Image (tube, coloured by chain):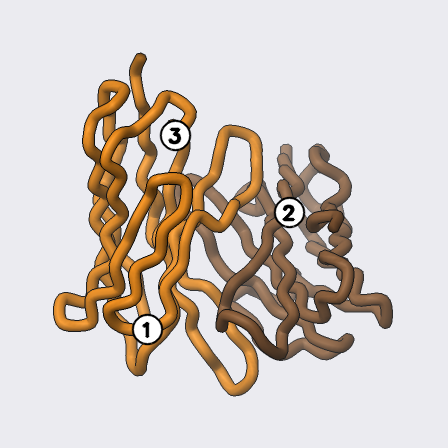
Chain colours: A orange, B brown
């Protein structure tokens, strides 16, 4: 079945460092891909999305490119801030008839130190 | 536009009891999905409802059930609670018919502790 694999955390960085969180997927067809972020004590917020190969999703300085050839959707940010500290989840949409569900990776905790 | 609202935010139950969680989706959204989040299993899909009908179901035992009302509000119920049911239960809504496939908007969750 479809699945998402993302790098183990925690990832600890100093403020203004470059961030990469790796995400690869296994899927039949061409699912939409997402990054969601979860701050302590909160639900999930959509960070960015891409719906087809070579699409680049971007938001709040974060970027990810849908790479069909490597089945990857790595999250990057050029200069992280303390406020980016959270758990980041990579996900793909899995379609069954007219219904969609999200399949999530295990999450990567990001800790940014001042 | 108000977001997805889940109640209660926190609750404590004992083994064998049952629990009902409520979710109000974003206005105009007709699809409501439920996910369970635990440290060991991560985020797992429970079920999805659209126009009062269950369209999709995850791999959970029959103790987990849900329903959706005509105003799109949804409830999920867990009967005969077990310690392993302790989790954050997240509700998510979407239009269900158009837009980005699989783009969901999540509530803040209901944290259930089973003692």
Q: Label 1 is found on which chain of the structure? A: A
State the separation of the CA atoms marked 1 and 2.
27 Å
Q: Residue at x 63, y 74 (%)?
A: B96
Q: Label 3 is found on which chain of the structure? A: A
Give me the disc on residue A52. 1
Residue at image mark 2: B107
Q: Residue at x 86, y 72 (%)?
A: B70
Q: Quadrant of residue A15?
A: top left
Q: Assign the C terminus of chain A to one quadrant of the image.
A: top left
What is the total number of numbered labels drawn onto the structure image?
A: 3
Q: Are marks 2 and 3 in contact (CB under 8 Å)?
A: no
Residue at image mark 3: A84
Q: Quadrant of residue B69?
A: bottom right
Q: Position of residue B18 (x, y in %)?
A: 75, 49
- Between B112 and B30, the one lying in front of the other is B30
Q: Position of residue B40 (x, y in %)?
A: 39, 43
Please tell me whether mark 1 sits on a helix, a strand or a loop. Answer: loop
């Amino acid at each position: 079945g479809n699945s998402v694999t993302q790098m183990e955390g925690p990832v600890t960085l100093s403020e203004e460092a470059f961030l990469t969180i790796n995400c690869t997927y296994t899927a039949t067809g061409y699912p939409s891909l997402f990054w969601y972020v979860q701050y302590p004590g909160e639900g999930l917020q959509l960070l960015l999305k891409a719906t087809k190969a070579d699409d680049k999703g971007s938001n709040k300085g974060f970027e990810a490119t849908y790479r069909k050839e490597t089945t990857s959707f790595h999250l990057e940010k050029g200069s992280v801030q303390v406020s980016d500290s959270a758990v980041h989840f990579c996900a793909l949409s899995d379609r069954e008839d007219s219904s969609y569900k999200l399949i999530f990776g295990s999450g990567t905790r990001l800790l940014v130190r001042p | 536009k108000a977001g997805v609202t889940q109640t209660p935010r926190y609750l404590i139950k004992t083994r064998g009891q049952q629990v009902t969680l409520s979710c109000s989706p974003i206005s105009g959204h007709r699809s409501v999905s439920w996910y369970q989040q635990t440290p060991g299993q991560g985020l797992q899909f429970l079920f999805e409802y659209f126009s009062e009908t269950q369209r999709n179901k995850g791999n959970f035992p029959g103790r987990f059930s849900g329903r959706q009302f005509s105003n799109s509000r949804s409830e999920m119920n867990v009967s005969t609670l077990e310690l392993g049911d302790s989790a954050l239960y997240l509700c998510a809504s979407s239009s269900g018919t158009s837009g980005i496939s699989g783009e969901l908007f999540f509530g803040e969750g209901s944290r259930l502790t089973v003692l």
